[in-house]
Amino acid sequence: MIWKTAWKNVWRNRVRSLVVIASVTIGIFAGVFAVAFMNGMIAQRFDAAIDEEISHIRITGKDYILNNDPQIVITVEDSIIPAIRSLYGINGMVQRTLVTGMAGTASKSAGVQIVGIVPEKEKEIFSIYKKIIPGTGDYFKRESKYDLALIGQDLAKELNIIRFVIDSAVLKKLEIQKVPGDILDKISVLAGKRFPNEKKFTSTITSILSKSELREYAQLVKNEAWSFRENSKITLTFLDMDNNQVSAVFRIAGIYDIKNAMYEQVQVFVKNDLLCQLAGIDENSFHQLIIRLNDVNQTVGITNEIRTRCPGLDVKNWKELQPDLAMMTDYVHQIYGLFMGIILAALAFGIINTMLMVVLERTKELGMLTAIGMNKRRVFSMIMLESVFLSLTGGVVGMIFGWISVVLSAKNGINFAQYAEGMEAFGYSAHIFPEISLSFFILITILIIITGIASSVYPALKALRLDPAEAIRTE
Amino acid sequence: MKILELKDVNKIYNSSEIKVHAVDGVTLEFQEAEFAAIVGPSGSGKTTLLNLIGGLDMPTSGKIIINGTDLSKLKSSQLIDFRMRNIGFVFQAYNLIPVLTAKENVEFIMNLQKWSRKVRDERTFELLQAVGLSDRANSRPSKMSGGQQQRVAVARALASRPKFVLADEPTANLDSKSAATLLRIMERLNHEEKITFIFSTHDARVVKMAHRVITLEDGKVVSDDVRE
């Protein structure tokens, strides 16, 4: 009866209750969507880091990590591979050879890390092979008489391998993407011109488009004007094991794009046997052993186990290699809880105000209820339930709207193309797919109920302090 | 059978400067199934006396004993429970719960006492029929006239078979026809249910129907007439 009465009381003043419910709905909706957005961003960053950059565990020779000394190698004879493979929870392993050097073209050069890989084995651990930009080549698939190197998009831009061209095909593509005619007219004056690098192209379109047009369409135009010179060459220069300078010309196997500018600028992949041969590294030696686990939650346990089995080596897991990412994933739920807590605390003041008005308006009725035998516990429960119903109704509607918005936006993602450069500089994709877990909805529901209860305490105590004889006489 | 006893009951309100002796040395006894009216001019202490009898207020001195229980010996929570089980209230302004239907208002106290649904339904139907509102069981107070609301209030007061019903000016807000209907119903229920009714009233019609009339002046009982 108390539950039924409390629920009916919520709807006694419809407009007032709907205002409170609407404010809770908007707050929860905004909170759910913001958390889903952050969650999607962090999850994408985590997946990218594990799948494309570092995997779960990385083993190197003792102190290799201090100065990347190529002399510090692990050899197959160390028999660590069978020792690790026998561990439960290992999904796969891959060996890499590394040398530091320079990559250069006729016009530019940049410092790089040259990574010797066995492409087919790499596919078991990393998914870079899926990130080759269409039209730029492939992941060491094609037969070639030349030596091949896979480079990142940002290095390609840096070395002027990527050029920018406006031609009729580009204009047609932009028209299909609903770029307005007046902008197409402005861009068409660039038709037939070639820009050797992004900087020159950007400064040219900046001079012909307004600020608002640039904000809206610059990235789109860049994406379409982007072109790749086939069979481009780069020269990789590095020191071999005897400290002799080695230079070799490579053709571009393909250009990868993993939305991490720092990684793309530095990491150049070549076939391992070729790098070993050029650098004079024994083919039974390698610099890194990278391990993929079945379950990321086993990372710390397996890391410790490997450390026990391989005491002479440096064993680092992803948490140690990228502590910022570890902090984000470890504390993400506390951060979300705090974020929602702040939203709900703000909403609580509105609920308290409403419930105080409720008590004030119903003084006579509350006095009557106490007079006819409703004890303090029941009066308190009734006020508390009204507050919980009020907040929970808004909360549930907000969660439903939030969930729908997450589902809809996750279909195609939210693309912040205009901020791509800045976001990719920190390793975050500008194309975000919001995601949220069921456990988060459970957490919000609990927080909403706590907010409802907490908001009712002061008004309910006021109701309990009423003197029934006086309250009944109230007009 | 004696159900209510007041022994030299005094109630003094202490404001900052003046002491008000609202009830002054009242000693009374009420038997089962009485139909009594407390009358007197405004400020004579009628409502204060009803509040004391109903345990809504505590006397400054003296004793109020209901069915052998001294109210002053009860803790606040026990007093609320005692009121629920022993006393029915009818207020001048009806004071029904506006969001509940007539039926739900009547069964409210039975719900608080955790009566079974079957017994509750039977008692509610019986009472709504007795007050002539069985056809308005599902109406909310806002859809009923003042007289009908007060009849629902009477049914609610009787729902848990209390020892007595206290009614503070029950007909004050009613027109003469509604007041007459209400009084007839109360008199019949008093007779049928053997429940004592104690009214405070100014209404001559109530006084006329009462079997006992207690007159208060300045908080003192100046007459106590029992009629046959």
Image (spheres, coloured by chain):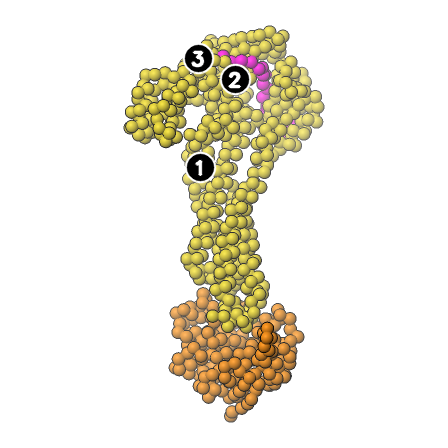
- Identify the subunit bearing mark 3: A
Label 2 and label 1: CA atoms lie apart by 32 Å
Query: Which quadrant of the structure image shows residue A466?
Result: bottom right
Q: Amino acid at mark 2?
A: Val
**Picture layout, residue A279 above or below residue B79:** above
Check disc 3 and give the amino acid type: Ser
Q: CA distance from mark 3 to mark 2?
A: 14 Å
Output the letter for the chain in yellow: A
Tell me the quarter of the image containing the N terminus of chain B: bottom right
Q: Which residue is mark 2?
A: A268
In the image, which residues are magenta? Answer: A86-104
Q: Secondary structure at mark 3?
A: loop
Q: Secondary structure at mark 2?
A: strand
Q: Chain of mark 1?
A: A
Q: Is residue A291 left or right of residue A4?
A: right
| Most common SS among magenta residues | strand
Type of amino acid at the residue the image marks with label 1:
Ala
Residue A91 appears left or right of B96: right
Residue A341, given in percent of the width and then of the height, sits at: 54, 46
Q: How many marks?
A: 3
Location of residue B102 in the rendering, given as x and y in whole percent from the top left corner? 44, 70
**Who is closer to the viewer here, B48 or A48?**
B48
Callout 1 crowding tier (Cα within 10 Å): few <14, some 14–19, many ≥20: some
The Cα atoms of the two marked residues, 3 and 1, are separated by 37 Å
Chain identifier of the orange chain: B
Q: Nearer the viewer, residue A150 or A143?
A: A150
The x and y percentages for residue A222 are: 39, 24
Relative to A320, does residue A272 appear above or below in the rendering?
A: above
Q: Is residue A272 visible?
A: no
Residue at coordinates 50% horizontally, 81% vertically from top-left?
Answer: B42
Q: Which residue is mark 3?
A: A232
